[in-house]
Image (cartoon, helix red, strand yellow):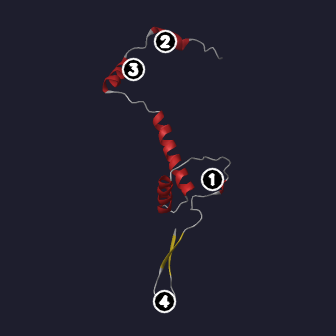
Amino acid sequence: MISTTSTNQSPQVKTSVHLPYDYRMTEANTNKNSRFEMRLTQEQRSRIDQAAESKGMTASQWALSNLLTAADRDIREAHIMRLSDEAWADFTTALDEPMPQRLRDLLEQEPTWT
């Protein structure tokens, strides 16, 4: 959104202009060849439109930005292991123990894929 102020002889009037795209749109992210569609209630669509407008974005830009943020978070969290205090204590104890002979033998074997 760009705000301007009139400078002629009449009283100053603030006006707003919504640009059809924002500064993040580049050639790299406008060459899109896939669609993602979803069905929404009118209330859901109105909320998305309102949020997008508050950021100076189209509904599609706002939705994509937020979906990608959520996707990155979920992917990142899928690689995090959460342990109870008891499980953590068992895990660290196991790390401190000497490696069993069966595992040492396994590590010394030639891999089958070579």
Q: Residue at x 63, y 14 (%)?
A: 112
Residue located beneath label 2 in the image: 104
Give the percent coordinates (x, y) of residue 102: 48, 9
Residue located beneath label 3 in the image: 95
Name the residue type under label 1: Asn
Name the residue type under label 4: Ser
Is 13 drawn above or below residue 47 in the view shown? below
Quarter location, residue 97:
top left
Name the residue type under label 2: Arg
The crowd level at tag 4 (other Cα within 10 Å; few <14, some 14-19, many 20+) is: few
Which of marks 4 and 3 precedes in the sequence?
Answer: 4
Residue located beneath label 1 in the image: 29
Residue located beneath label 4 in the image: 10
Rendered-image quadrant of the C terminus = top right
Element under disc 3: helix
Give the percent coordinates (x, y) of residue 105: 51, 9
Q: Residue at x 51, y 58 (%)?
A: 49
Give the percent coordinates (x, y) of residue 77: 45, 36
Is 75 drawn above or below residue 88 in the view shown? below
The crowd level at tag 1 (other Cα within 10 Å; few <14, some 14-19, many 20+) is: few
Q: Distance from label 3 to label 4 (Cα)?
A: 78 Å
Which of marks 2 and 4 precedes in the sequence?
Answer: 4
Give the percent coordinates (x, y) of residue 41: 50, 51
Q: Distance from label 1 to label 2 (Cα)?
A: 50 Å
Is 101 drawn above or below residue 74 in the view shown? above
Is 72 drawn above or below residue 90 in the view shown? below
Q: Distance from label 4 to label 2 (Cα)?
A: 87 Å
Q: Residue at x 53, y 14 (%)?
A: 107
